[in-house]
Amino acid sequence: MILVYYKAIAALAIFIISLATALYPLKKQRLKHPESAELGEALASGIFLGAALFHMLPEATQIFAHLYPGFSYPLAEVICVSGFLLLLLLERLSLTHTSIQSKNSIPYILTLILIIHALTEGAALGIGTTLSETLMLAVAIIAHKGSESFALSVVLLKHELPFKRIVLIVIFFSLMTPLGICLGTVINQFSLARDDALVAGIFNAFAAGTF
């Protein structure tokens, strides 16, 4: 139960940081991306990669092996690759089309990509069963969440979206990781049943791909 409190604190901190850094360029109208944010992104990327390869994907593989002992197909790896390909597809859609209509859709596609990533990283934190794992993912999320929110806000400003719409988008985006944490925590609390363990395995594999 104490672990749930740590997750709640992490969710609140992530929401505040995400919202504050997203609203900052709206107030200052500055489009510079600080070098410290790049260092934070590099640190977070390493942590996410390690969490995906050394914890989340192996755990998903173990869950599927336990649920389906006679099933030799690499189900966890397929789900992991599916998560990776989904984000890659959305990213390519935002970069390859050059028509005016497609350019107008770029900020919304980018928002969708970030929302999916925010939900899965939050769910990964919520599913965590140990304090060290929770703290590791919380630090990784906080390390990159500020620059991610800042970049999203800058993109929305560059495409000259209405101010109220930008505010609504950044608030909605800021809520996604805490929502993912809540979802993952609920799954973790009820993961004793066979079906719930299957859901946990799917989430771990999919989140590893998006990481």
Image: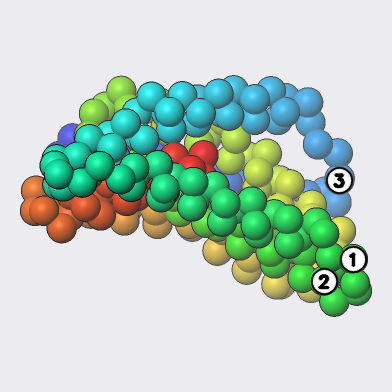
Reading the image, the residue beneath label 1 is 98
Task: Please report contact status of discs 2 and 1: CB closer than 8 Å, yes or no.
Answer: yes
* Marked residue nearer the N-terminal end (3 or 1): 3
Residue 74 appears in the rendering = yes
Compared to 99, does 92 lie above or below?
A: above
Q: Where is residue 54 in the image (x, y as percent from the top left)?
A: 38, 24
Residue that appears at 90% across and 66% down: 98
Q: What residue type is labelled 3?
A: Arg
Element class at badge 1: loop
| Residue 25 rendering spot, x and y as whole percentages | 78, 49
Rendered image: mark on residue 30 = 3
Question: What kind of element bears circle 2?
Answer: helix
In front: 114, or 152? 114
**Residue 61 found in image quarter:** top left
Q: Name the residue under label 2.
A: 102
Q: Distance between the residues labelled 3 and 1?
A: 26 Å
**Of the two numbered discs 3 and 2 in the rendering, the one whose residue sits closer to the viewer:** 2
Query: What amino acid is at disc 2?
Result: Ser
